[in-house]
Image (spheres, helix red, strand yellow):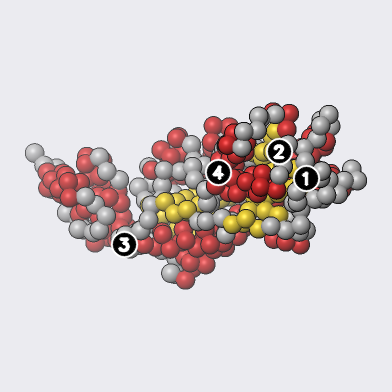
Amino acid sequence: MAQSSQKINMADVARAAGVSMATASRALNNDYGVSEATRRRVLAVAEELSYVVSPEASRLAGGATGRVAVVVPHISRWFFAALLEGLESVLRAADLDVLLYHVDGIEDRHDFFHRLPARRKVDAVVVLAFPVGEEEQRRLELMGVTIIAAGGQHAPYPNVSIDDETAGRQAMDHLLFLGHRRIAMIAAVDPDQPDEVQPSGRSNAYYAALRDAGIPVDERLVVTVDWGGDQGADAMAKLLSQPEPPTAVYAHSDEVALGAIRTLRRAGLRIPDDISVIGIDDHPVAELTDLTTVRQPVREQGERAGRMLLDILRGEETEHDVVVPTQLVIRGSTAPPRG
């Protein structure tokens, strides 16, 4: 026997149909974005349970709180601040409020995702520039709202990012074109991210470029450090201690590259006469320091993510994965090797 409609809510229908709250709402309200098979299944379950859509339930599940949760691991770093600025500008123009959740460190991150499903009174969640683990994905999906990602490629949600491997290849191919064969890599990892979700595209580019150029990999020329300028300086000191130092250095980021340059200058070496250095990102100080780099449009990624989210909330068609192009910017820190 069907249960009383007063005892049934949309969550019951969604659970019985095996779909999210958002999908159930769209199916019951004949909105865009639900396959015909899913719509029929949800409607059949609703009829079996004698569920009647209430205007209030439809409004909340359909996305009308006017709030978006944004999860960010760092807010003091240039990259994250620029990404957030672009996203917030688009959402603010659409009269959506941004609720910022700062997850600083692994312990704080675990605590946040454990408590996250209780924070249901938002229309969407935007994850900024960090890969989401499997357990974290499950916690996010319990909210039953739209989820998108920006600034990182390691999430199974609609996302906006660059292709890290392509950016790395642009940097490496530039050094190879100049004639360098003994190229070092300073790989950077985020200490606040679990090992299993550390991005690898920029490292993959290094090994692929050497392989394609027929150059054997010398693991003594690969140093992995935590993200940051001081760490880049320490890594460069290790590379200079090799019996045969590199003629060029490929760093995972401009901050790391600038740290390496500090060590080189203190060692009395000239850039690029004695050694070339290239980074990735085009940090605001890269131009001031004449650093050759691969530019990624950070603010644009945030803006694109904002527009993507608005399209989804309005039930309009949108791309699932947007890859924003990067660009090699040649400045004064790279040149052909001497001799």
Residue 241 in the image, given as x and y percentages of width and height:
84, 32
- The one nearer the camera, 123 or 199, is 199
Q: Residue at x 31, y 55 (%)?
A: 61
- Tag 3 residue: 316
- Tag 2 residue: 181
| Most distant residue in the front direction | 339
Q: Secondary structure at mark 4?
A: helix
Q: Secondary structure at mark 1?
A: loop
Q: Are marks 1 and 3 in contact (CB under 8 Å)?
A: no
Q: Quadrant of the C terminus?
A: top right
Q: Which mark is residue 337?
A: 1
All told, the count of numbered labels is 4
Residue 77 in the image, given as x and y percentages of width and height:
66, 53
Among numbered discs 4 and 1, the one appearing first in the sequence: 4
Q: Which mark is residue 165?
A: 4
Among numbered discs 3 and 2, the one appearing first in the sequence: 2
Say which amino acid is labelled 4.
Answer: Glu
Q: Residue at x 30, y 48 (%)?
A: 21
